[in-house]
Amino acid sequence: MLTDDEWEELEPLLKKDIECIKAYRTETGVGLREALDILRHDACERCFEITGFTETNPDVLWHHRLSIYGSECTQCGHLFRTPEASFCANCGYIPSAMVESAV
């Protein structure tokens, strides 16, 4: 997952990569999978430098921004799906603050 500062560094690279993929597909007529396999992806390379995780599809990086998720569940450790989530989608836990505010 990327912090907002890391995301600000990665987002322009990601947008550039997506435009390059679109242009390459328009010019050559190849499918998305082939374009992804052939082209170099600056955003994926930078993400690897930041996180140590290898990603080959730049489109997946849109979901690696930590601030789009909620806090960590105190029961199972997974992140809530959004900052506004009222329960953990992984284990179903409802924080006591949510239960008390619903009463």
Image: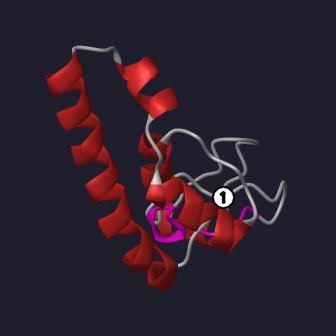
Q: Which residue is mark 1?
A: 79
- Name the residue: 60% across, 52% down: 87
Question: Total marks drawn?
Answer: 1
Query: Which residues lie in the magenta part?
Result: 65-73
- Colouring style: secondary structure
Give x and y (percent) for residue 14: 36, 57
Q: Residues within 10 Å of mark 1 (few under 14, many from 20)?
A: some
The kind of secondary structure element at disc 1 is loop
Above or below for 14 versus 60: below
Residue 96 appears in view: no
Residue 77 appears in view: yes
Q: Toward the viewer: 70 or 8? A: 8
Q: Main secondary structure of the magenta part?
A: loop
Residue 77 picture quarter: bottom right
Give x and y (percent) for residue 101: 50, 69
Q: Toward the viewer: 93 or 57? A: 57
Answer whether residue 63 is magenta in the image: no
- Name the residue: 30% across, 15% down: 30
Above or below for 11 versus 62: below
Q: Toward the viewer: 13 or 83? A: 13
Answer whether residue 70 is magenta in the image: yes
Give x and y (percent) for residue 6: 51, 79
Q: Is residue 26 left or right of residue 46?
A: left
- Name the residue: 70% across, 68% down: 51
Give x and y (percent) for residue 93: 73, 51
